[in-house]
Structures are given as C-alpha cells and as structure tokens.
C-alpha cells in the first residue's frame, strides 16, 4: 500500500493521466475511483461545543452521543422532501360548520 500526499493540481493531473490511457481496465478503474475518494480523507474533523454537549448530557441524564444525535436532528432541511404535497394556489375550499 502506498501513502502519498498530493496537491489538488497534482491529483487532477494524475486523474487525467489515468483517464488518458487507451485501455482502462478494472485495476485502473479502481485506482481512479480511489483517487476520487481520496479527497474526502483530507477533510478536517468536526468541531463541536463539547462543554455544552457534556452539560446537556448531564442535565438530561443521557450520553454525549445522544445529545450529538439530537443536535444533528435539529438542522433545517435544505430542500423539502420530494414526497411533500405542493401547496395549491388560489382560494382554499370553504369549510363546513361542525354539525
């Protein structure tokens, strides 16, 4: 196994070199896929307000993992779910009085 650190430009050149091969067999396909995924290994670790997480866990009597799970669930969705029914334009239908 090789471990190599590449700049973004070097990574792009290496991917272009692999793609330029006349016959890209299974080994080169996997190498290209590994190069595509290698970029995600360089992301920084997440930074959380651990003192707040610890305090909330103590207050609620749960683990820190439960608090982190709850924090993740509080994020607003960027786009509505595709199965959400769209709102209709125009007047709302008249409601009948309860009998």
Image (tube, rainbow, N blue to C red):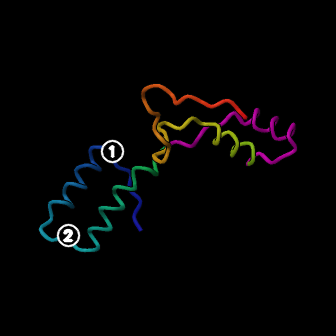
Which residue is located at x 19 percent, y 60 percent? 19
For this orientation, the residue located farthest to the front is 99
Answer few, some or many: residues within 10 Å of disc 2's Cα (few below 14, many 20 plus, some between 14 and 19).
some
Q: Nearer the viewer, mark 1 or mark 2?
A: 2
- Count of numbered circles in the view: 2
Q: CA distance from mark 1 to mark 2?
A: 24 Å
State the SS at label 2: loop
Point out residue 63 in the picture as x, y percentages from the top left corner: 80, 48
Judge left or right: residue 4 versus residue 23: right
Sequence-first disc among 1 and 2: 1
Point out residue 56 in the picture as x, y percentages from the top left corner: 80, 36
Look at the image and tell me in which quarter the N terminus lies.
bottom left
State the SS at label 1: loop
For this orientation, the residue located farthest to the top is 91
Which residue is located at x 60 percent, y 30 percent? 95
Look at the image and tell me in which quarter the C terminus lies.
top right
Answer few, some or many: residues within 10 Å of disc 1's Cα (few below 14, many 20 plus, some between 14 and 19).
few
Question: Which region shows up in magenta?
Answer: 44-65
For this orientation, the residue located farthest to the bottom is 26
86, 79: nearer the viewer: 86
Residue at the spot of label 2: 24
Judge left or right: residue 74 versus residue 44: right
54 part of magenta stretch: yes
Residue 9 figure quarter: top left
Relative to 42, does residue 48 appear above or below in the rendering?
above
Judge left or right: residue 55 versus residue 4: right
6, 79: nearer the viewer: 79
Residue 88 figure quarter: top left
Residue at the spot of label 1: 7
Which residue is located at x 51 percent, y 28 percent? 92
Point out residue 52 in the picture as x, y percentages from the top left corner: 76, 32
Which residue is located at x 87 percent, y 44 percent? 61
């Amino acid at each position: 196994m090789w471990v190599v650190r590449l700049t973004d430009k070097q990574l792009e050149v290496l991917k272009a070199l692999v793609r330029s091969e006349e016959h890209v067999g299974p080994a080169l396909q996997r190498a290209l896929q590994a190069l595509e995924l290698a970029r995600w290994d360089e992301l920084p670790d997440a930074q959380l307000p651990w003192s707040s997480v610890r305090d909330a866990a103590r207050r609620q009597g749960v683990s820190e993992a439960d608090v982190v799970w709850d924090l993740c669930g509080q994020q607003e969705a960027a786009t509505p779910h595709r199965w959400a029914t769209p709102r209709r334009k125009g007047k709302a239908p008249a409601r009948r009085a309860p009998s």
